[in-house]
Image: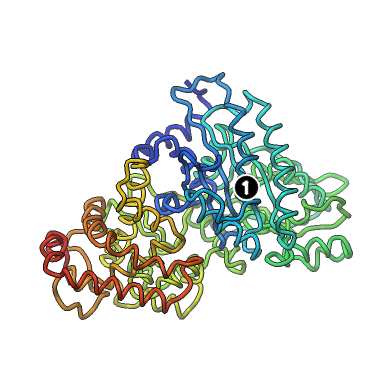
Amino acid sequence: MIEVNIVGYMADFYSRTELISQYGNNALLLYALQLRFEISDITSVASDALTDGGNDKKCDLIYVDQDMGIAVIAQGYMKQDPQANDLAPGNKASDLNTAATWVFAQNPDDVPEQIREQVRLLQSSIEGNSITTVYFWYVHNLNERNNPQIKAELSAMQKSARTLIKSLFPQSDAEVFSLEVGNETIERWYNAASKQITITNTLEVDTPKVGFELRGDKWRAYITAVKAMWLKRQFDVYADDLFSGNPRTYLGSGKKKNKINLGIMETIENQPNNFWVYNNGITALVNNYHVETDASGENLSISGITIINGAQTTGAISNMSTLKDAWIPIRFIVCDDANIIDEIITNNNKQNEILPSDLRSNDKTQCRLRIEFEPYTKLYYSGGRRGNVRPSRSREILDPYVVAQALLAFHGDCVTAYNSKNELWSSDHLYSSIFPENLTAKHIIFTYSLSRAIDSYKLELQQKGNERMDIEEKQHKFLAKRGAKMLFLYTVSKCMEVVVGKKINDSWGLSFNNNYDFDALVSLWKIVIKSILPIACGALENALKDGLKSKELSETAASTVVGFVSSFQETYQTQLKGFADAMEF
């Protein structure tokens, strides 16, 4: 079996029995994606991103996150009973050339239906400059060093993909990277997700030989400056590992989205002597530091490092082809208290708005909701608070952004829920409408389990493949369209009075009378979905032309479905009696 030094991630991966049973050979690909981008609800992502099948044009996954500005096109390989010396197949790496041609060069209307919606979203995101980085991944469960040919294949693929994207999208600032994601890389990501400081080497620091120390009750810090070239050398060696404790890595220097980074580069090019007074500097957590004084001044060495604030400064400096002498303000902090470390990271990054949910996590409503979730030991809701300890994967993790999307769509605005995911937490108006004072943990579970049930049913249809009946094929095609999930979630909410056979005076009060078995709630919702979707998908398709854009069209389409369902009210109420009996309102 695989060597001992990688059992960390392997043990964690194989403990994810539900992920493996649901997604089979694609489970590792999803696991790697979740680790790399700190995705809470990978099931929701998988519903939209997985494309693996008979005509996927070498794209097992196409993941687009406009809020983060990244896209991932991935090919996966999962070796059964892997041995330490096994080689990852080289043809899988070269297959990514085919993937690049299809996702970049083809008219979305001409690509196979299986990947059409993802390609359409990817291309429109690149054209709109909402994607700054496109990754091509070859994910496998073997040792990367065994087959050096793969890196050569990926390097050639990266070069051709960069040429392709620049010729087809000349106005875009998007950069392309290829990456082999084998055991070594996944293990590194796993360690980065498990602890704040991944780099543990002892480093000599290039300072002006002067600095000073400050101490608190649970921390101490050394404040000085470092040469720009020293910072660049660390980035060249350690890349993103340098930011293992940082919620945000380097975002690039595209002219539209990252003007600050472009400005950093211009300053150090044109005014290097003034850079120290212009730049806010860098904050780094270290395991330890040591200062020795000699005739030349103070010599600083550090043990371990993660830059928790200053990723953009570091990346922008390191991205320059020629680097002039400049000093960068920096402070090295030693702290062993996990709660203090978490607060250091949070407070150092508030000005960057890393995640809008971070700044709402202490809102009184979120604090109350976290308390309300405490009795449900198999569920975990962070309320936007990100800590340095990952919740157990034995618990169902409710992603705060999917929570907000499900709530907003259920309560009437599926268009904003789909198109403005990040704004749901950042906009005061939207946030207050989604998280009102009367919102309960029970209602969050109610709407979230509906969202999960739609994902689950979509996967069920996908896995049937050629065995899908005609009516199931229509449902599968509908659910594959951009915005279909949020539109259907909204439509189900409009049908609730027909489903329960009673007047609903307060839809915010809807919940289940027993919320301890989340899987059972998902199963209840799937009964509703299988009853409504067959007659709804045709009427709803008109609202999904070019994505879910029109509130008027979505409202009209949903009302049409309510009319259909109402005409069979007695049948539905008999069929869905078990669901209605499980509710309270």
Q: Is residue 536 above or below residue 37?
A: below
Of residue 18 and residue 343, the one placed in the foreground of this image is 18
Q: Is residue 24 above or below residue 432?
A: above
Rendering quarter of residue 564: bottom left
Residue at 33% x, 49% y: name it.
Answer: 395
Q: Is residue 34 above or below residue 264?
A: above
Residue at 38% x, 64% y: name it.
Answer: 403
| Residue 155 in the figure: left or right of residue 389 | right
Total numbered labels: 1
| Residue 355 in the figure: left or right of residue 584 | right
Rendering quarter of residue 362: bottom left
Of residue 352 and residue 82, the one placed in the foreground of this image is 82
Residue at 56% x, 52% y: name it.
Answer: 110
Amino acid type shown at disc 1: Tyr
**Residues packed near mark 1 inside 10 Å, few (<14), some (14 to 19) or many (20 plus):** some
Residue 16, image x, y percentages: 38, 39
Circle 1 sits on which residue? 135
| Residue 385 in the figure: left or right of residue 242 | left
Residue 150, image x, y percentages: 65, 30
Q: Quadrant of the C terminus?
A: bottom left
Of residue 273 and residue 481, the one placed in the foreground of this image is 481
| Residue 433 in the figure: left or right of residue 302 | left
- Colour scheme shown: rainbow
Rendering quarter of residue 294: top right
Label 1: state its secondary structure: strand
Residue 214, image x, y percentages: 66, 59
Residue 184, image x, y percentages: 58, 33
